[in-house]
């Protein structure tokens, strides 16, 4: 399983960090982390409820889905209704599985009336460097 | 040291993930991860050289700086000169130290003629969930 291999790669590096890149052949596309950025504008009157739903969705996804590597939600400083969610998945299959997960569908239906605009930015990975927590 | 505590927190969770949040008191601001997003437009004629310098900077920062937790560089799909760099630091001190690191200064001076526009998006963390590589 691609997700498993990716995580084992992290754990195997004794120096405590890993570097993921995209220099491999096209046939290995599904083995690569998928990185996506979501840019949202939230109804200010529903911001607290939205953030609670978002936190629940992130916690459940990280705990329950092996292929969801990171979900990081921030707001733009001084613009609390401008939310950015930075997402990394072990591979394309993990990303597709996440879209079908019941907790993700619950989040989407609960928050659809709170989201004024949503832009999904698809990306090509250049380099992902991260501490593994092994130091 | 804040960075050390943050990484130990990751390693101590047997379930293999960690959740960072920003619900603490104002006095703990320096203990929190700092998340920053850089949005760059690169001169297309110098894109390959720029990406090589960026990769070197990321690899060195992750390896040499305990407080640099993640540096993830992507390009917007179908727009290879539009680069986004998602950065997380253990705390404000780690971020300030990174700006003074010799490898970061080298990257900045080497690439200043390649960067057409640069926007730094400062953020407030809502929730950071990530696998630790412990699974």
Image: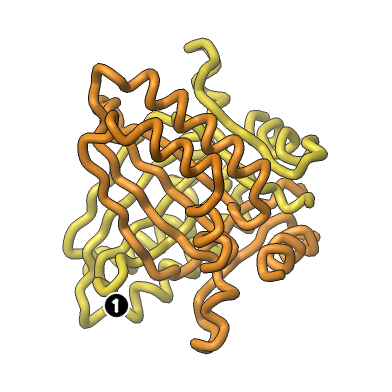
Chain colours: A yellow, B orange
Q: Residue at x 67, y 41 (%)?
A: B63
Instruction: Please tell me which residue lies in front, A18 or B96.
Output: B96
Q: Is residue A8 left or right of residue B57?
A: right
Against B119, residue A123 (above or below) is above
Please indicate whether residue B10 sits to the left or right of residue A52 in the image.
Answer: right
Q: Is residue A96 visible?
A: no
Q: Position of residue B116 (x, y in %)?
A: 21, 35
Name the residue located 46 percent from the left edge and 23 percent from the top edge: B52
| Residue B22 visible to the viewer | yes
Percent of width and height locating residue A76: 30, 65
State the image quarter where residue B56 is shown: top right
Q: Secondary structure at mark 1?
A: helix
**Residue at 22% from the left image edge and 68% from the top image edge:** A113
Residue at image position (57%, 83%) is B28
Provide the residue designation for mark 1: A47
Q: Is residue A57 above or below residue B117?
A: below
Q: Position of residue A38 (x, y in %)?
A: 32, 51
Instruction: Looking at the picture, tell me which residue is in the foreground, B122 or A30.
Output: B122
Q: Position of residue B13 (x, y in %)?
A: 76, 63
* Residue A94 appears left or right of B40: right
* Left or right of A114, for residue A23: right
Quick one: label 1, few (<14), some, or many (20+) residues within 10 Å? some
Image quadrant in which the N terminus of chain B is located: bottom right
Farthest residue, direction left:
A116
Viewer-proximal residue, A79 or B122?
B122
Q: Total of numbered circles in the picture?
A: 1
Give the image quarter of residue A115.
bottom left
Position of A105 relative to B22 (above/below): above
Badge 1: chain ID: A
- Relative to B63, is A113 above or below? below
């Amino acid at each position: 399983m691609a997700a498993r291999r990716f995580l084992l790669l992290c754990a195997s590096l004794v120096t405590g960090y890993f570097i993921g890149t995209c220099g491999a052949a096209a046939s290995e596309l599904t083995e690569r982390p998928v990185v996506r950025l979501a840019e949202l504008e939230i109804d200010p009157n529903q911001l607290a409820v939205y953030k609670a739903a978002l936190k629940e969705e992130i916690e459940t996804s990280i705990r329950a889905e092996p292929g969801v590597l990171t979900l990081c939600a921030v707001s733009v400083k001084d613009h609390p209704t401008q939310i950015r969610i930075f997402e990394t998945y072990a591979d394309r299959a993990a990303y597709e599985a996440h879209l079908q997960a019941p907790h993700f569908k619950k989040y989407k239906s609960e928050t659809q009336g709170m989201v004024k605009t949503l832009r999904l930015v698809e990306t090509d990975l250049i380099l992902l460097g991260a501490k593994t927590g092994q130091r």
